[in-house]
Image (cartoon, rainbow, N blue to C red):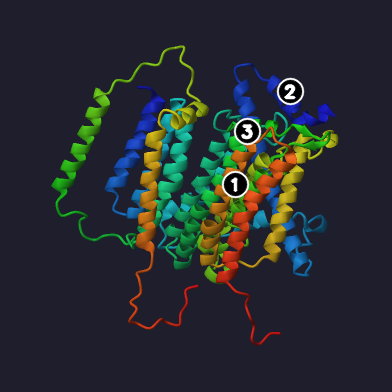
Amino acid sequence: MDALDAIFVTLKHLVVGWFPALLQPWVSALISIGAILAIFPLLFGLTTVLERKALARIQNRPGPNRVGPAGFLQFVADGIKSLTKEDIVPRAADRVVHFLAPLVVVIPPLLSFAVLPVGRNMVALDLRETGLLFFLMVGTAVELGVFMAGWSSHNKYSLLGAMRALAQLLSYELPLLLSTVPVVMLTGSLSLVGIVEKQSAVHGGFLMGWNLFTPWGAAGAVLFFIAAIAEANRSPFDLPEAESEIVAGYFTEYSGFKFALFFLGEYLGLFAVSGLGITLFLGGWLPPFSFLAWIPSWLWFLCKLAGLMVVFIWLRGTLPRLRMDQLMRFAWQFLLPMALVNLLVAGLWHFTSPWPVALRWLLGVAILAVPYLMFNRAFERRHPQRTYRYVS
Amino acid sequence: MTLPFALLAGLVLGGALAAVTCRERVHAGLFLALSLVGLALVFLRLDAEFIGFVQILVYVGAVAVLIVFAILLTRGAENPRERLGNSPGFGILLAVAVFALLAWALTSASFPKASETAAALTVRGVGDRLMREYVLPLQAIGLLLTAALIGAAVIALPAPTNPATPPTNHDPE
């Protein structure tokens, strides 16, 4: 089973071994880059088909079912179509910025895959000192790309979309960053590989030590994934591109392959941030139970990613879009304070390590529950139950 | 001066020059972001990973975005037709004075040469220093930023309504 687990690593070493020693670091880097460039865009294609089919099921219609087996080659047809479409740039647009924006949106998520450990010993670039920081830094660069797209189009809807996107991305970045801090505090390392390895302890003979299985980890994961959906501009936080309000938001004036690039960048960003969530809270490439360790590590990572995608598609199909003020209030008045409370819980968890586990859990849950219930009550006081006059 | 350093210096200086000479304000903001990225790359070439990444995270990810956001919100995106300042001499004088002060401070400061055996400064080391030796300056900066934040919130608050006027039907909630 170890051979299967390390199959990609072994293959890479084999190929690298064919080249003279001088070229080997270059070949090794090129293979890693090639793998990232091949796998994640392919995953993007498959996810779009899956998403369209799942949304169709939720809306009681068949969805794409013509191209390939059960419609699963639809993404190839879509890709070819977008390549052959005319590339229209508005006359008033700022041509250079308009051209650069899709690139600024697509390249950062691709860079971030480099530090993501997708399996045992399977990470393109292990930044031992600053892995997590690199990831977060790369994520922030997307904001500028979104702004460039919206502003350079010289279109009111684009500009509105860009403004919404900037306000949303800036607001949700804070809870996203703060919900990752407890993991760094408890792991004592910014290295993503180190964070995964720290979660490999086995509790009670079978349960793995995922960060999810601690009070701060569970709360942190919920906060992180809410903020992650907002950062990825996905429904119910898809105000920047709300099609029923502002056409397509910041990429209204893009056509053909540039439009496809925005789509690609969005999904790659979603994969990247989900991968980070898996690494931080869901044990990375580790199995949930130690007796399942015979399944290869990369398959675990892929399964978790696929599972998260299904959850995100499900959310998109079933939740209505938020209003702008609700969005802002949610970030600043709920997520941010809860993330700060979670820091306290993580600190207490660290300092009460000699205590019995049940007591530590009770303490953590109590500290998290009290502010949560208070926020809940304040919200209900401000927004009493709606009454409908004409609907029973 | 090596070639990579020359390229990066060109990027930083070119970006900064373009940022101050550009007529279009949004372009100026984007050039500033470019210049800041160049600066981060200079840090990375000096093996200062932490500072380099934080530079991009804070300055490109937050400050540059806030600058362009502010330009849009203040209707500054419409290009000014008239000349920017009516007394360029004063601005130039100020810029030269600031530059001279910084140059004097940098040239007169003594940088202890790192010995060969000195341990590389890790993120853990930076945190340790911040929390022990420099905890007071850190707290002072935190206080300053909090004060700025509260000030911004106070400015953004709606003006107190005059009690004489009847309340409108429209409820913002």
**Chain hosting mark 1:** A
Residue A14, label in figure: 2
Cβ–Cβ under 8 Å for marks 1 and 3: no
Of the residues shown, which amino acid type is indicated by label 1?
A: Asn
Q: Nearer the viewer, residue B67 or A77?
A: B67
Kindly state the secondary structure of the residue where label 2 is placed.
helix
Horizontal side of residue A305 vs B129, given as left or right: right
SS class, disc 1: helix
Measuring 59% from the left and 60% from the top, which residue is drawn there?
A374
Residue A187 numbered tag: 3
Crowd class of label 1 (few under 14; some 14 to 19; many from 20; radius 10 Å): many
At horizontal 65% and vertical 58% (from top left) the residue drawn is A81
Instruction: Report if residue A274 is visible in the image.
Output: no
Q: Quadrant of residue A84?
A: bottom right
Return the mark for residue A342. 1
Label 3 vs label 2: CA separation?
A: 34 Å
Reading the chain from its start, which is encountered first: label 2 or label 1?
Answer: 2
Q: Nearer the viewer, mark 2 or mark 1?
A: 1
> Which numbered marker is on residue A112?
none
Amino acid type, mark 3: Thr
Between marks 1 and 3, how big is the CA–CA gap? 15 Å
Left/right of residue A86 with respect to residue B7 in the rendered view: right
Q: Is residue A187 visible?
A: yes
Q: Give the chain letter at badge 2.
A: A
Q: Mark 3 or mark 2, which has the lower sequence index?
A: 2
Q: Are marks 3 and 2 in contact (CB under 8 Å)?
A: no
The picture quadrant where one finds residue B137 is top left
